[in-house]
Image (cartoon, helix red, strand yellow):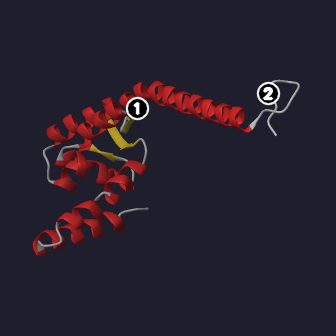
Amino acid sequence: MINLSGSRPLNRETRRLYVQYFAVMQVRICEDERIKAMPSRAILARELSALLKVIAHPDRVRIIEELRTGALDVTALSERLGIPATRISQHLALLKAHRLVEERRDGRHHHYSLFERALADWLLDGVRFLEHRAQSDIAAQQVIKAAKKIWSAEAP
């Protein structure tokens, strides 16, 4: 039996009141912790939104997927993707500024690689959402399947 008074046991009604009081206080503490956590949730949401904005260009998605296999220079990326080297450089500068790719210099050559290879894996995992949306479009399904096969095969 709970004995908060120190000398004699509490009666049933007093115990019930203590239990209710502590339950309310626990809820209040949980709410306070949730409210304190909200600013960090807002910061995290803002950071994730910024990351998605950086990735949200078809050329940058293709660059990230090409870098999945390892470091490449601008010329190699340009040839593989069929995108002008100047445009590749601009996209790489943005990806580098947001610490998604890193640069290694070898004389006059600049080799770029993913800072975290998991980013390319994450994008490939996102393809399943497209597959779900394209269930009624046979052509879209074929395109998705072909790209997924290519990207999956390139993984080391």
Q: How many marks?
A: 2
Estimate the x, y position of residue 120 in percent, counting from the top left. 35, 52
Q: Locate the C terminus by quadrant.
A: bottom left
Give how far apart the Cα atoms at labels 2 and 1 are: 39 Å
Instruction: Provide residue 87's location: percent of width, then percent of height.
Output: 15, 39
**Image quadrant where residue 16 sits:** top right
Q: Earlier in the sequence, mark 2 or mark 1?
A: 2
| Rendered position, 81 above or below 47 | below
Residue 155 horizontal side relative to residue 150, left or right: right
Left or right: 76, with 22 as reference point:
left
| Residue 114 location, quadrant | top left
Q: Can residue 108 be seen in this view?
A: no
Amino acid type assigned to the residue bearing label 2 in the image: Leu
Local SS, label 1:
helix
Q: Name the residue under label 2.
A: 4
Q: Is residue 80 above or below residue 22?
A: below
Tell me what residue is drawn at x 34 percent, y 34 percent: 45
Q: Characterize the local packing of mark 2: few (<14), some (14-19) or many (20 or more) Cα atoms within 10 angstroms.
A: few
Q: Which of 123 and 117 is in front in this view?
A: 123
Residue 41 is labelled as 1
Answer above or below: position of 121 versus 20. below
Q: Identify the residue shown where x is 25% and y is 42%.
A: 55
Residue at the far right in the pictured view: 7
**Mark 1 residue type:** Arg
Horizontal arrangement in the rendering, residue 23 relative to residue 5 (left or right): left
The image quarter containing residue 5 is top right
| Residue 144's disc number | none
